[in-house]
Structure formats: C-alpha cells, structure tokens
Amino acid sequence: MATTILILYVSKLNKIIHFPDFDKSIPVKLFPLPLIYVGNHISGLSSTRKLSLPMFTVLRKFTIPLTLLLEIIILGKRYPLSIIVSVFAIILGAFIAAGSDLAFNLEGYTFVLLNDIFTAANGVYTKQKIDPKELGKYGVLFYNAFFMVIPTVIISFSTGDLQQATDFKHWTNFLFLFQFLLSCLLGFLLMYSTVLCSHYNSALTTAVVGAIKNVSIAYIGMLFGGDYIFSFLNFIGLNICMAGGLRYSFLTLRGNIKPKQPPDEENALLDSKS
C-alpha cells in the first residue's frame, strides 16, 4: 500500500499521471471499495490455510459466475447464452479436475466462498469507479491504498503480525531487503495490471483471464516438471477449463470486432457505387 501511494503521488507531482485531488466527495465516490479490498485479503489468506490446493482452486472458480451476476445487477450488462455456457464450462472443468479431492471443511468453504464474493464485488465496483467521470484508474488505486493503510496497520498490530514483522532478523540483510522491496513493486504492478485489464475489457474478462492463467501454470508444470501430479480425471478437467476459457476469449474478441464492421461495409458499398 505504501509503495502504491508513493509511486502514484510522485507521478502525480511530476504530471506523469492525473487523478482528482482529495475532497469530501472522494470517500463517497470510492465506497465500498476499501472495505471490499480488506475483506478480500483477509478471507483469501484464511481460506488458503484451511483447504487443499485442488479444492481451493475449484471453489475460487465461483468468482467467475458471481462476477457475471454482479455485472448484470450493478452495471446492467447483458451477456449472450454462448458467453454464459463458456463460463460454466470453466467451472465444470475445475470440478472434474479436483473430483478426487472433495474433502469437506465447513470453515474453509465459508472463507473461500466469502473470498469469491469479495473478489467478484471488487472487480465489478472497480470497473464502475475507474470511469473517468468518477475517480479514474489511478484515483481508485491511490485512494484505496490511502484509506486502508492505517486501518490495516491497526489490524496487524492487534493480531500481533506487526510485532512479528518488526522482530524479523533479516531486515539488515541486503538480499532480503532487495527482494522484499521488489515484491512490493511487483504487488503494485499486479494491482495496476488488474485494474488496467478491467478498464479496457470487463470485470468478467479479468476473472476469466485469472482462471486461464491458473490452467496455463498447470500445463507448464506438466511439460517442465514441478509439483504437478498427473491423473486422467485432472487432465480432462484442465482441458475443459482451457476450452471454456479459449471459447470465451474468442467470443469476446469477435464481439469487440463486430461493431466496426457495419461502417466498413457501408464505405465499401459507397466505393463500389462511385
């Protein structure tokens, strides 16, 4: 959060980027994003500890239909049946891939489903708030971090995490310090790229891209080693997941290209007449 605030504020001072100056309307415009942001982090960390990785991956896929539903409710979007079928193909593939690991853990399921809701809400509200008429993408990133940095420090202090961090032995280790600062920078780049993806596409596309990324990592693990354990059911599920993701990408790209066709056809018709 501190890295995000520093980078964006220095960039604003140097007129590299622009976002609105603080006034009384900013908290109203930003609400409820900061609360969703913290809820997303806390539920995500809690659910990771309680579930096996395959089951965690399956349940995290519910972010996609929740995002689709919230875009319909909050943003008033409408999606064709072909897009909805592609989305559910991704979820079906995830269930098949983790079919051998359906161990039930009520606390873990509760946290991961809460995490799905927070992630979906974060994506949809970010899409709404990054409108240039609202805060813009830089304003959302800056004020989200600005409003939540102090409450997060207070939460860290109350849980004892802050004390553990200050007592850490390697703060004087140059290599650790370099890697720690690099992770802060990469964290900012990750948030920025996610917001940028939502800005140019949609919250649903951003969620689907995340799902395709996870499947791609599994494919790379198959080819080049790692901790992937091959099973036929898992392999079939991953392929269904990837097919659904690729189908979604194809339909989205075709949908983006289609509006440009009528003017071209009209121009071609005029040219042929002349």
Image (cartoon, helix red, strand yellow):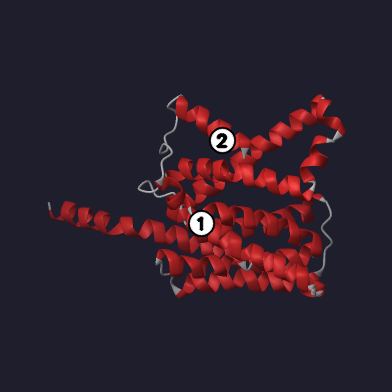
**Rendered residue at 56%/68% (across/down):** 66
Residue 212: x percent and y percent? Answer: 63, 58
Residue found farthest to the right? 169
Disc on res. 195: none
Q: CA distance from mark 1 to mark 2?
A: 19 Å
Residue under label 2: 5
Viewer-proximal residue among 114 and 193: 114
Residue under label 1: 32
Viewer-proximal residue among 40 and 153: 153
In this image, 92 relative to 257: left or right? right
Asked if 96 appears above or below 274 in the picture, the reply is: below
In this image, 144 relative to 40: left or right? left
Residue 184: x percent and y percent? Answer: 67, 37
Residue 130: x percent and y percent? Answer: 44, 49
**Rendered residue at 83%/51% (across/down):** 226
In this image, 271 relative to 180: left or right? left
Q: Earlier in the sequence, mark 1 or mark 2?
A: 2
Q: Amino acid at mark 2?
A: Ile
Asked if 1 appears above or below 242 in the picture, the reply is: above
**Rendered residue at 80%/31% (across/down):** 176
Residue 26: x percent and y percent? Answer: 43, 46
| SS at mark 1 in the image | loop
Q: Amino acid at mark 1?
A: Pro
Q: Quadrant of the N terminus?
A: top right
